[in-house]
Amino acid sequence: MTERDPIERLEASDGLSIEPRPEFASELRIMLDLRLRMTEGDAPSSERNEEGAKGDKAGSSQRPDRLQTLILALLALLIFLAIGLVTYLAVWVITKTDSPDPSTPTPTTTAPPPDEKSADSPGPDGSLSDLETQLTEAGCRVLGSAEAQRFDCSGTDLSNMLLDGASLAGSDFTGAQMPGASLAGADLTGATLNRVWLYAADLTDANLSGVEILGADLNEARLVGADLSGSVIQDTFLTEADLTDATLREASLTDVILYEGDLTNADLTSASLTRVDLTFATVRGVILRNAKLSQMQLIQLDFTGADFVGLRVAADWFLVICPDGSPQGVQETLPCGIRE
Amino acid sequence: MSTPAKRLTDHEIASFETLYSSELPVVFGFLRIRAAGDVALAEDLTALVFLSAVEQFQAGRGDVVTRNWLLTVAKRRLIDHWRRLEVAERKAPLLRPTTPAEDLSLSLSERELVERALAALTITDQAALTMSHLDGMSVPEIAEVLGRGKRATESTLRRARERFRVEYRRLTGD
């Protein structure tokens, strides 16, 4: 038994069909069957509306149920609003009665808990701003002067933190854990995001121009409208990330996994992409003007509406849809009139 | 992002079910050996592969889903998984339990011995070894997946082979 080289045994063990556990096989079959039979009528609400407009028979049979649900939801909303209004008025009357100075209105809203504070600027008396407090409590260090404040948040845990609109330019987030963080509209210009964990983070409209992102996890991150111009992204996961309308002009992406990512209308003018995995990605309307693609496999991608002017490629193309909506020719190794 | 689901005909559903029945053991077997016998992982990845197949059917591209297509998707999912683990392993090296040096050649099947020997290697070694010896990938191709240079990949492969031999022989009591 041991006379053969173990490597030969390894090679011989491939190609074997193995029956999985029957429970797994049947559970998976049920799940797939449900997905398979899912029609437009079962799809999310936006698709359901389209169905309604089409007047589909199957859809119309379910319409009374939906109408009932809608009416009930509206009623619940009205009751909720009425209760809120009554409570608000009651609190306002009580505070007005108790207030020593009737000219000073008392705020009736509750201050947000510390975790939900959003960023603002430093106080006029030089005290710590909300942003500073929030970040220093999480272990970040303040760097630079008050005018050009930066943070060293390397290795900190900023999970689910609300940092919308925060000024974080030039800050260091190396190795920080930021899953679920909300950084919509934040200024991260020139920030360092090496090995950062930004899983499912919201970076909508964030300014990430000139950032360095190496070995990071941005799977399922929302980067809609984000500005990543001139950024350097390497060895990074962007699986299922949403980069719709994002700007990646002159960005450099190397060994990036954009599996099932969404690049609809993203601007990659003069960007350089090397070994970027675009499997099942959405690339309609993507701007690749003067961009360079190297060592990539572009399979079954729909580039309808994309801009290929000046595009330079060293990639394998297979079954793609060209910007004008026409399919790649069977004999074409470089489709859509692209020149190497 | 996902393609809107279209109503499938009975014929399309039947085609998918035939494909599922015939290819499930193939895809699972393909993934199980490459996942070094990790059944849970192989099941997860198998589910993802067939979900991708369903999406193709719903997008009206059921005809592209062949055995080769399924195995290509399986390989991509696995590479994605390896890369993720490799990054994690770089951050915090995993302590891999070593099995006692006893002769398991009688109690375990040949495939299980191979899986156990593979499981004792690092993720990078597992990935390099299976890509080279199961998928017949060249050193430059493996280097590309691992994000390393050719020389580094060659030495990774050499080291992985040696570790695999040592581990396999340990398991068989040699």
Image (tube, rainbow, N blue to C red):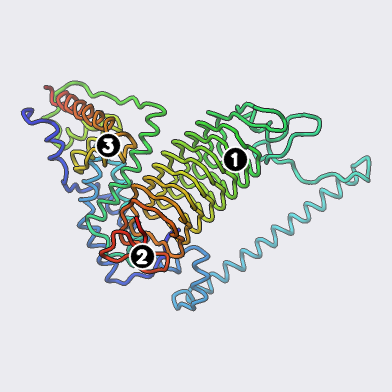
Q: Quadrant of residue B86 in the image?
A: top left
In screen coordinates, is A142 left or right of A41? right
Residue at image mark 3: B127
On-image quarter of the N terminus of chain A: top left
User: Vertical placement of A330 versus B23: above or below?
Assistant: below
Q: Position of residue B164 (x, y in %)?
A: 20, 29
Q: Quadrant of residue A77 in the image?
A: bottom right
The front one of A46 and A220 is A220
The front one of B96 and A57 is B96
Q: Tell me how far mark 1 sits from mark 2, CA to CA.
A: 41 Å
Q: Is residue A33 visible?
A: no
Are dots 2 and 3 on a single chain?
A: yes
Disc 2 vs disc 3: which is toward the camera?
Answer: 3
Label 1 residue SS = loop
Residue at image mark 1: A189
Q: Which mark is residue B58?
A: 2
User: Vertical placement of A249 versus B110: above or below?
Assistant: below
Q: Amino acid at mark 3?
A: Ala
Q: Is residue B124 visible?
A: yes
Label 3 residue SS = helix
Disc 1 packing (10 Å; few <14; some 14–19; many ≥20): many
Disc 1 vs disc 3: which is toward the camera?
Answer: 1
Disc 1 vs disc 2: which is toward the camera?
Answer: 1
The front one of A74 and A40 is A40
